[in-house]
Image: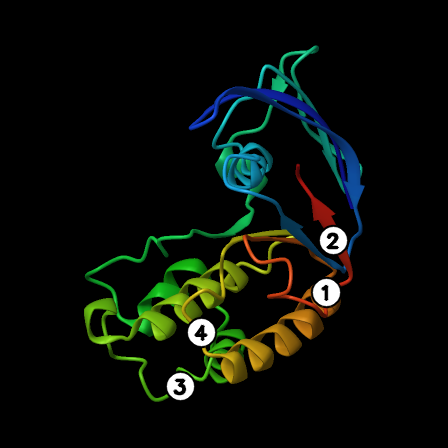
Amino acid sequence: MIVIDIEKKMRTYEGNKVLRLNTQFTKGAITKIYGPSGSGKTTLLKIIAGLIIPEMAKITVNNELWQDTARGINLSPQQRKTGFVFQNYALFPNMTVKQHLEYATGDKLWIERLLHFGKLETLTKHKPEYLSGGQQQRLAILRALAIKPQVLLMDEPFSALDPEMRGMIITGLKALVGELGSTCLIVSHNPDEIDTVDAPLNLP
């Protein structure tokens, strides 16, 4: 479970804005975060991951204090070990599909399971430039899952997938998140894109 109380000043195309959020996210469940551009969806994920430092924050994950600005506590991104799916995928150009996963984990059985889940088992020796946009996106999802994260943060992770593949990945993702006991947050611009998740959060 993530318990979060944050305040972050943001600059948007509409001018200055403040992201304020005091809520909690359930362990073993998926929360969809949606809202208009500039509402702070990606900023929220990066704050949880430790990639952005807010003016005020208290973040607790599974009873472990990750950040408390009032007390000067702030775990590094490496210490938080979140699984993060970036909107631009952030893949390594010189690594093959399998090397991306091996970089994250040495568990060969888990790697094989992820490759099957992402339908990439026949593309293990391919580098990102030889993958389609949808295949790259699936690889980014698998890499984030490879570390078996307690927190999985996903920024527009299904935008390049066709409806059939998206449905398959979401169904499998829900099962894996429940199995791992992860807390998963998915950012989407489209409130109807992920209609089978456990809970929605709308940022105005």
- The residue where tag 2 is placed is 200
Residue wearing tag 3: 121
* Mark 1, secondary structure of its residue: loop
Asked whether disc 2 touches disc 4, contact meaning CB atoms under 8 Å apart, the reply is no
Q: CA distance from mark 3 to mark 2?
A: 32 Å
- Tell me the kind of residue under disc 4: Leu
Tell me if label 1 and label 2 are in contact, CB under 8 Å.
yes
* Circle nearer the N terminus (3, 4): 3
Q: Disc 1 designates what residue?
A: 197
How crowded is the residue under tag 3: few (<14 C-alpha within 10 Å), some, or many (20+)?
some
The alpha-carbon separation of the residues under discs 1 and 2 comes to 8 Å
Q: Which residue is mark 4?
A: 161
Give the mark nearer the N terminus: 1 vs 4.
4
Judging from the image, what secondary structure is the residue with disc 2 in?
A: strand
Residue 105, horizontal then vertical, whole percent = 46, 63
Q: Residue furthest bottom?
A: 122
- Give the residue displayed 79% in from the left and 40% down from the top: 24
